[in-house]
Image (cartoon, coloured by chain):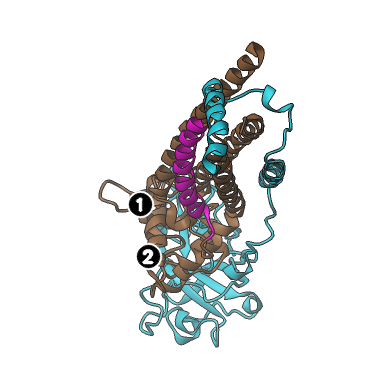
Amino acid sequence: RVDYTPVLTQSPRLEGQTTASTFVLDQPRCVFEEYGTADIWLVVALEQAVSTFNNSAGPGTPNTSFQSFPDPVRAYMTLNATLANYPCPKAAGDITVLRVGSETSCIGDGTRPSCNGPLPGPGPYRVKFLALQGSEPVAETHWSDQIKLKTAQSPGSISTTGSGHSGGMIAITTILSILLAILLAGLVAMLVFWGSDLCGGSSTFSKPESVAVRRYNTHHVYDQPAARL
Amino acid sequence: MAKSDDCVHILQGLLVFGNVVIGMCGIALTGECIYFVSNPHGLSPLLKAPEGNDIYAAAWIGIFVGLALFALSILGIIGVLKASRTLLLVYIVLMLITFAFEMASCITAAAHRDSLTPDFFLKQMLERYQKSEPASNSDNEVTKTWNELMLQNHCCGVQGPSDWQMYTSTFRLTHRDADYPWPRECCVLNAQGLPINLDGCKLGVPGYYNSNGCYDAISGPANTHAWGVAWFGFAILCWTFCVLLATMVYWSGIEY
């Protein structure tokens, strides 16, 4: 057993570290140095299958095929690599990750049992790396901690009501209602008092042509009785 | 006599000035509302509320109210200078009707602005973006608007790419999560419109995807629209109130 625990990639911070059907692990660099000729496989297992996983179960067999996961196969093997894929030490600035679940072309393809297909559910899952020499397991890492994937809610659960009214809208409504009420009251007052002298009457101010009008009125006052007669 | 003549002239002068200001504000309101209705930021498909009572209804009312204010202000000036009771009475009544319409427009604009929360846009985006059998043309419009928004503002989703992970969506129905954790438009694209690093984008490596949300890019113009219609209209109405009160006082003092 090699003293290494697979971990989700912490640095750099990845937005897609866990999604609904994929997760990202750090590559096992400088871990399998003594096993230069072995095949290094990733075992992905349901939480309950961790204790019952048999290292001798060969990859690429129906017992470990991705297409039969999670039922009846409780753990599958994928991401076959050799030590050449994981050079040590890791070059600075490189992002060395393994994206579990990225291969979508072989999801239903029974001829590719070691497909790195998207995980079928939110988990939880646990993973470990297993080095095989031929078909003999020669080294393995510890099982990782539980990996839980994201579950998505329905957009119907988003509530868009009850956002309330802002102070601005309430202020506008109140003030404008009051102004309109005052104006309507003024209009009513105007019409009710039409014809009556409110503010001291004709001496307050008069029409610009007032002088001329008075002269006309004088004529008309004399003319009308004449017309009646 | 001389003193009350002076008062008359001052009041007439004030009323004419008040009406000139109303006329100019009316033209400004019309111009502003035409600008908003012409959809300068391309956001109108997102802002249309299904019930139809929205900022655009308020803006349309604003256009006609602005023209009415301009016309009535001219009527008011003529009525004040001729000191005609009839003209001024017609002026006051029509102004009150215009006042009521503009009040409705302001309140609608302010109320609709309040409803434009991030959750509103989030729900709309999740339910209508990339709808494969669009129920109406407006769904296509929503998709096009979101794509342009994300490309031009280098943003993703409403609050970030996590929107696409936290919620199921119409987009998710046609695009597998492993291939499209978020839409391709959230990736940093090169000159040909292709992601500069597709794997980097899918992983969410900083620099290869847009990590910030588009809400700021939406709410900025939406706020300007709403406050432009609501608060400018409110200011005009306050001024109109003063002018109308003064006109009523003037009217009641005219000799008949």
Q: Is residue B64 magenta?
A: yes
Apparent side of residue A192 relative to residue B216 in the rendered image (left or right): right
In the rendered image of the structure, the colour used to display chain B is: brown
What secondary structure is found at the residue carrying circle 1? loop
Residue B240's spot in the image, x, y percent? 59, 35
Q: Measuring 40% from the left and 46% from the top, which residue is drawn there?
A: B41
> Magenta segment range?
B53-79
Q: Reply above or below: A47 against B155.
A: below
Measure the C-alpha gap from mark 1 to mark 2.
Answer: 28 Å
Q: Main secondary structure of the magenta part?
A: helix
Apparent side of residue B28 relative to residue A139 in the rendered image (left or right): left
Q: Camera-side residue: A36 or B45?
A: B45
Q: Camera-side residue: B14 or B56?
A: B14
- Disc 1 designates what residue? B197
Q: Toward which corner of the image does residue A1 lie, by quadrant? A: bottom right
What secondary structure is found at the residue carrying circle 2? helix
Q: Measuring 40% from the left and 42% from the top, which residue is drawn there?
A: B35
Question: What crowding class fits label 1: few (fewer than 14 Cα within 10 Å), some (14-19), or many (20 or more)?
Answer: some
Q: Measuring 66% from the left and 78% from the top, which residue is drawn there?
A: A48
Can you see residue A92? no
Amino acid type, mark 2: Asn
Residue A86's spot in the image, x, y percent? 43, 55
Q: What chain letter is assigned to the residue under label 2? A: B
Q: What chain letter is assigned to the residue under label 1? A: B
Chain letter of the cyan region: A
Amino acid type, mark 1: Asn
Which residue, as the protein is rendered here, is positioned at the far left?
Answer: B192
- Disc 2 designates what residue? B140
Residue B243's spot in the image, x, y percent? 60, 32
Which residue, as the protein is rendered here, is positioned at the far front?
Answer: A229
Do residues under tags 1 and 2 come within 8 Å of each other at their CB atoms?
Answer: no
Residue B222's spot in the image, x, y percent? 51, 46
